[in-house]
Image (cartoon, coloured by chain):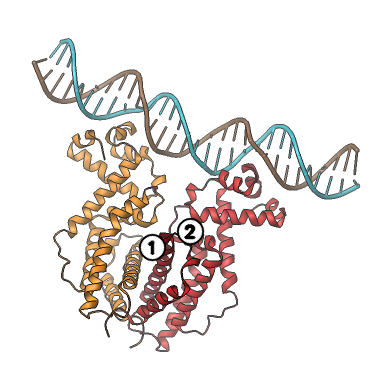
Chain colours: A orange, B red, C cyan, D brown
Amino acid sequence: MPKQTFFNLPEEKRMKIKDVLIRYFANKPYSKVDIEDIAKECKVAKGSMYQYFENKKDMYIYAINEAIRLSLELIKDYNFEYISLFDYVEKSFDLTWEFFIKHPDAYLLLERSAFYDDSPYKEEIEGLLKGKTKELLYEIIVKNQKTGFIRNDVSPEIILIFLEGATWSIKRFFIELAKSRGVRVTELPRDYVDGIRKSYMDLIKKGISNI
Amino acid sequence: MPKQTFFNLPEEKRMKIKDVLIRYFANKPYSKVDIEDIAKECKVAKGSMYQYFENKKDMYIYAINEAIRLSLELIKDYNFEYISLFDYVEKSFDLTWEFFIKHPDAYLLLERSAFYDDSPYKEEIEGLLKGKTKELLYEIIVKNQKTGFIRNDVSPEIILIFLEGATWSIKRFFIELAKSRGVRVTELPRDYVDGIRKSYMDLIKKGISNI
DNA sequence: CATCTGTATGACTATTGGGTCATAATCTTT
DNA sequence: AAAGATTATGACCCAATAGTCATACAGATG
């Protein structure tokens, strides 16, 4: 937890530091992030950073928690309780997309911390992150199998893996595509993105076989 | 490239160093790998490592190339030319599985170097790795679309992403499963693995919809 | 203005780890 | 066996960087 000093800071300065922390930890592996750089970017001395936070880990965990908060803000008033699996997958893609557009660094930070990174606190963070959405998705799968909306000859665990792989790779695809074109994901033509997404959803539904 | 000195080394020592390099770079991010540790494990002085290799990058690239060589050895006498997509996906899963069982560290190294790692040479390595199998898979997809074996209302690029995500996540799943059970992947019951794999292939073929 | 409390600073310390090099050990050649 | 070539060694150098701390500064209080 950041120290009291940090919370006493004027709003603007606190926000600035938050943004910079998220940006830095989002774009470099933990061990490559230099506190000196962050301090410079925040226009404070390195020592000050240590007046605000216990240590580097504290800064990192704080950044992640703030990123989680940002992501939850988008989801909070959406009720996933009674929803079909396909709607869920589409909706969750939409929400992730929106999240990425609004807070790209926060998105990248969460992605990185969840399964790219070399930070020593990975387990700790995975607990925070994956658990909930995974459980929710699992429940929805089971429900949808019961209602006969999706096939039930395959165990929900396997469908879960399948869906996770599929949704992850399509997101990655857009991120890589944007990178290779030298633009931001926001700048990819919306109808192009939607077209691919639609085809992709159809693959998830019906598979690649020729029917 | 390793220096001549390295190739002059007695076979046994060279193999030892190769194995240790692969093991270390496979299990830690590049920046966390300490040459001193590697030297100790190889029972040589740190300085000797620098008689054999130019620098750390040289050791890393060498390890990756050796891992690639190991993987190619398994594929080399298999002809993918005229094969159905499903057979290809199954066969390539088989081969990967075999590779993983025989050379788990080499497998993990390639996986890590391709998309987990923080090494500064990622682009360089991605070129070595992904290109070929990706191209091959793409060709097979196109062929299979032409022969009407798989649907052609979705572009081959999208099917490619879909397949990559799917095959990656199932492999990941088994690795994580083994880890969480505290066993090696080799120790997972074969029929269990095959069962999941079969269901999974079916998901790829027919999707999750209830038909 | 004087004192007190909290905040800001950057030089400094300590550690880590890649890479070097003079020297010693070993092997080859004649 | 002597000279010469090759290989092995680990103390040393140096850059990077997490974390500290004495000191300076600023704002509030009376």
Specify the quadrant of the image occupied by residue A104: bottom left
Name above or below for residue C9 compared with residue A11. Answer: above
Could you confirm whether marks 1 and 2 are on the same chain? Answer: no
Q: Which quadrant, please, contains the C terminus of chain A?
A: bottom left
Specify the quadrant of the image occupied by residue C7: top left
Residue A177 at x, y percent in the picture: 36, 65
Question: Observer-nearest residue: A36 or A187?
Answer: A36
Residue B37 at x, y percent in the picture: 56, 45
Residue B1 visible somewhere in the drawing: no
Question: Which residue is under mark 2?
Answer: B113
Q: Give the side of residue A189 with respect to residue B158, left or right.
A: left
Q: Residues within 10 Å of mark 2 (few under 14, many from 20)?
A: many
Residue at the image point whose x is 50% and y is 67% from the top: B186
Question: Which residue is under mark 1?
Answer: A180
Local secondary structure at mark 1: helix
Residue at the image point whose x is 43% and y is 85% from the top: B144
The chain ID associated with circle 1 is A
